[in-house]
Amino acid sequence: MYTIDGILLAGGLSSRMGQDKALLRRDHRDMFFYILDTMEPLPLKNILISRNQGQIQFLTRHQVIQDIYKQQGPLGGIFSVLQKSHVDGVLIVPVDLPLIETIDLNYLLKAGSEGNNPVHFDNHYLPLYLPNTQNVRQYLKDVMDGTIKNRSIRNLCRHFNAVAISPKDEDRLSNANTPDQWRDAEYAISII
């Protein structure tokens, strides 16, 4: 049987935001729980959380995994989580997508699992479906070791010829990395 884990990336420094993005309030809950709520209805074996020591920890039934290599960006979190994941693929979702909905993640998950290729939305490298293969794990290890210098999700997607699919609603893929982007997201939420 084909199995997929979810990865919630919530361990970044949030330096451009100036505060922990996981703690930003969306409606009645933190962004951390908003993203978990969008992931939990999906057919995932586990949801694994990338979050680091020194960050406020959340009470959750899901396993929290700290980065093995510190301050290596999203790829560091993905690498660390994949050391604990023994499934065929992973659905990677960052904590900074305040408009994302379960329907969007399900669409991405289905597209990825059908061909077992890396899949992302046009012009957006996260969220990402990523096969959990030896080649992917080796690539991430090479990034962590410095053999591969470019630590971007975009470079990972290019390396593995990721498939880009059209989103059902591109506005829902807007991320919030700065206070201005967060204000725009709050406005968009208020008029939904």
Image (cartoon, rainbow, N blue to C red):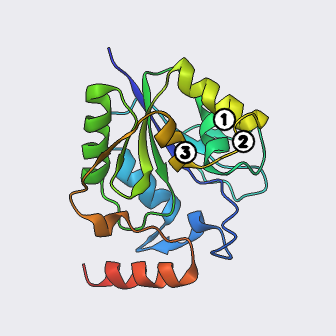
Q: Earlier in the sequence, mark 2 or mark 3?
A: 2
Question: What is the CA distance from the residue labelled 2 to the residue labelled 3?
Answer: 20 Å
Q: Which of marks 3 and 1 is nearer the N terminus?
A: 1
Q: What residue type is labelled 3?
A: Asn
The secondary structure type at the circle numbered 3 is helix
Q: Choose mark 3 or mark 1, whichever is in front.
A: 3
Between 126 and 20, the one nearer to me in the picture: 126
Quadrant into which the N terminus falls: top left
Which quadrant of the figure has residue 131? Answer: top left
The local crowd at label 2, few if under 14, some if 14 to 19, many if 20 or more residues have their Cα within 10 Å, is many
Q: Mark 2 — residue?
A: 67
Kind of residue sitting beneath label 1: Ser
Residue 71 is situated, as x and y percent measured from the top left of the image, at: 76, 51
Q: Where is residue 192 in the image (x, y as percent from the top left)?
A: 24, 78
Tell me the residue at 59%/37% (across/down).
63
Label number found at residue 155: 3
For label 1, the residue is 80
What distance separates the C-alpha of mark 2 from that of mark 1? Answer: 5 Å
